[in-house]
Image (cartoon, rainbow, N blue to C red):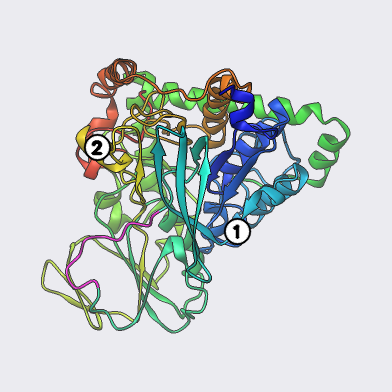
Amino acid sequence: MPLDKKYGESGPRIVIIGAGAGGLTCGISLKRKFGFRNFIIYEKANEVGGTWRDNVYPGCSSDINMPFFSLSTDLRNWKESHGSQEDIWEYWISLAKKYGLYPHILFNHLVTSAEWDHKSQLYNIITENTLTGEKTITTAHILISAIGILETPRYARIPGLNAFKGAMFHSARWDKTVDLKGKRVGVIGNGSSATQFVPIISEDPNVEILQFCRTPHWIVPSIRKTYSPLRRWIFSVFPFLKRISRWTVFLRLEMMYVGIFGSMVLRQLLTKLLTKYITHTAPEEYHDRLVPKYALGCKRVIFDTNYLAALHRPNLDLNWDGIDTIVEDGILTKTGEHIPLDVLIFATGYAADYYPFPIKGSTGKTIQEYYEEQKGPKAYRGTAVPGFPNFFLIFGPNTATGHTSVIYTNEIQINYIMQVIQPILERKVLSLEVSVEATDEYNEKIHSRLNKSVFTQCLSWYRVGGTGKVTNAFPA
């Protein structure tokens, strides 16, 4: 059968999973590059925005300067150097409206599985209406996963997790109905999210906070600022300045890369400077605990959002004893101390090495089964997986970096996807699949570098299970 007849007048059908930054950018690219409109985006929630819709914890904001945390096609005259959750979410909503993406989005629909049918050269996809529970079967010639790696909150594996009788939630699913005033609040974790919301909730002296920490982080001085009305006016009159500002941020971040990842001498110098910053800013009683013993860059670097200064507050204490058990009314530490609590907040990150639902390819294996065979997530250029024709990942394995913008790396990936699927959209071929040999060769190349990198020198979310293969970072 000629491909024109197989596809019909509307051409191949594309399904994108997720209406976060990656899914929206993909839809925008399909329209801008090809004028292509036969695609649908399945979104489990009732609005676009992904992580910027879901993460509503106090103080949530970007840790990358906004001129470079925006699409290259849609720069904005931002009011702050680092946008708040509200401003970033509004940005993505505005882009969905600007490019007419809403008619392409089916909200409140969760993709629960997909399976490749070789005979029909289609993915059979099952979705579930998150409001009614109704299940629907649909098909796609091309399937693009834009759920990213910040999708499934990870709770710490602590005995007694379900025993606690007070309010308990993850920072990625902040419960606004819980009033913290007058409460004893336990915060488990001290990573990037915790260091953003702890300074905010501890501003109220009636909230007593005990933060349970396991490993310190390298904390960098804040470079955040509010842009003046004069600067914003100048940028509105001379819009090319937005592009110059973007390039300036890009170069600054690349210089940070050189300092942290590219030069042992510069890394040692930065280590000394950051040690001085931490000890100068934080209370003396925490100095021995707050300065990491591992190499700078091994874990994600955290930009200070007044966290170190907040540690001087009398209603905020750190506990490094380790958690033995969660009990009905609080926590039992490994030293045997019983600490009563009213609220527990988990700031323990995401399950970044796990694909949350079954997608079966041409071999009958699921993505997760393939990952487990390979001892962790693995893909060609973080985008294509052998045995999965016409299937592509946005923010896939080894595409995150320790220093620059995920929006930038998303755009690079999506540009690559557009190149690969162009012959399908032009009706020249039915399906494409990366070879095992190409995938292995690519991964051997990047992992030969990763195995010698700073990323292997500590326990971190960059690695499978915290200590295994590095699958969430591009090699330094």
The structure residue drawn at horizontal position 45% and vertical position 45%, both measured from the top left corner, is: 124
Which residue appears farthest toward the front when viewing the image? Answer: 1
The structure residue drawn at horizontal position 29% and vertical position 45%, both measured from the top left corner, is: 291
The C terminus: image quadrant: top left
Name the residue nearer the viewer: 302 or 91: 91
> Where does the image place residue 117, in percent across and percent down from the top left?
40, 37
Residues rendered magenta in the picture:
152-161
Which residue appears farthest toward the right when viewing the image? Answer: 237
Asked whether residue 160 is drawn in magenta, I would say: yes
Name the residue nearer the viewer: 206 or 20: 20
Give the residue type at disc 2: Tyr
Mark 1 lies on residue: 107
> Where does the image place residue 87, in percent across and percent down from the top left?
67, 53
- Per the image, label 2 sits on a secondary structure element best described as loop
> Where does the image place residue 115, in percent across and percent down from the top left?
39, 42
> Where does the image place residue 454, in percent across and percent down from the top left?
28, 28
Kindly tell me whether residue 303 is visible in this rendering. Answer: no
Q: Is residue 410 above or below residue 353?
A: above
Task: Decide which of tag 2 and tag 1 comes sooner along the chain.
Answer: 1
The N terminus: image quadrant: top right
Kindly tell me whether residue 174 is visible in this rendering. Answer: yes
Q: CA gap, disc 2 to disc 1? A: 44 Å
- Within 10 Å of the Cα at label 2, are there few (<14), some (14-19), or many (20+) other Cα atoms? some
Q: Is residue 212 above or below residue 375?
A: below
- Per the image, label 1 sits on a secondary structure element best described as loop
Mark 2 lies on residue: 294
Q: Is residue 51 above or below residue 241?
A: below
Give the residue type at disc 1: Phe
Would residue 70 be found to the left or right of residue 282 on screen? right
The structure residue drawn at horizontal position 60% and vertical position 36%, both measured from the top left corner, is: 26
